[in-house]
Image (cartoon, rainbow, N blue to C red):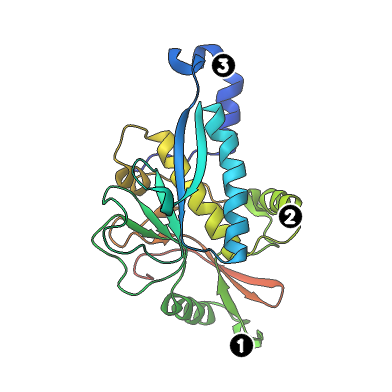
Amino acid sequence: MPAPALTRRDLLAWMLATPLAAALPARAVSAPDGLRLLVHGKLPEAAAQGLQFGVAEASVTSTLMRRELQLGTSAAGITGAIGVISVEPPSPGAVPSATPIVLLRDVPGFPDPGCTFRAGLTETERTAALERWRLESPAAGKAADPRVVAWHPSLFRYGAAELNDRYRKQTGGPMTSEAWLAWFAVKALVDSALRAPDAPRCQALAGTRFDGHKGRPLVFDPTTRVLRQPLYIVSGDEVLGELLWEAGNR
């Protein structure tokens, strides 16, 4: 049974209901334990901004839980990291097999035998999603150049408006699909480490449900290790429709 998603509302309720001194273990008087999160290679600008935004938000939660989030690169050494975020997989043997890797894009040969997860979409998945939308939507034929995205800056339900607003205030620009994927990768690795600190990292990531502000808990498929998530059909700056994840559409 996957662990429930750790939401900002859950954390606030816990803080209000529990005196902070009583909630923290005795070792909280010492320096916070570190959570090492690593980036492999160079991220595109939008993904890099989404990652920095995700680290800023996750740092608030981790500090309250007496864990200090530390961002570094894979070049500094990977041992002990809670996970690695990348647009392409590290070379074989570069990452310990017990360290999860979250890929922001599709790569040849995925999934691999190691602990690799994918949040981004493949062209095959985008095409299949468009075909499904065209079958399900009467207005599909009128759309000009529809495309499939994981996120859009005009989304507003389920806390999406607040997330988009926070992102725009920090970065000065809209939260694109690529930025959201990087933000989510940070959230997934940090949330799973906080919720299951004693579990193997790959097991914790695979077994946690996440709040991605999409109206339902997000999880990684236990077989494919691909993120199960709602997708959006957009044309220009308009969101035309939403597609929910369903078995077999990956």
Q: Is residue 172 visible?
A: yes
Tell me which numbered mark, 1 or 2, is placed earlier along the sequence: 1
Instruction: Please name whichever residue, 87 or 7, is drawn nearer the observer in this view of the structure.
Output: 87
Tell me which numbered mark, 2 or 3, is placed earlier along the sequence: 3
Q: Is residue 65 above or below residue 179?
A: above
Q: Read off the residue under disc 1.
A: 141
| Residue 131 position within the rendered picture, expressed as x and y whole percent measured from the top left | 48, 82
Q: CA distance from mark 2 to mark 3?
A: 31 Å
Give the structural element (helix, strand or loop) at label 1.
Answer: helix
Q: Read off the residue under disc 2.
A: 168
Q: Are marks 3 and 1 in contact (CB under 8 Å)?
A: no
Dot 3 amino acid type: Leu
Q: CA distance from mark 3 to mark 1?
A: 56 Å
Dot 1 amino acid type: Gly
Q: Is residue 151 visible?
A: no
Screen quadrant of the N terminus: top left
Which of the 4 image quadrants contains residue 233? bottom right
Instruction: Please name whichever residue, 49 or 18, is drawn nearer the observer in this view of the structure.
Output: 49
Q: Read off the residue under disc 3.
A: 20
Give the structural element (helix, strand or loop) at label 3.
Answer: helix
Q: Residues within 10 Å of mark 3 (few under 14, many from 20)?
A: few
Which mark lies nearer to you, 3 or 1? 3
Instruction: Please name whichever residue, 231 or 119, is drawn nearer the observer in this view of the structure.
Output: 119
* In this rendering, position of residue 92 left or right of residue 239: left
| Residue 149 position within the rendered picture, expressed as x and y whole percent measured from the top left | 56, 70
Residue at the (76%, 57%) spot, across then down: 172
| Residue 93 position within the rendered picture, expressed as x and y whole percent measured from the top left | 26, 58
Q: Are marks 1 and 2 in contact (CB under 8 Å)?
A: no
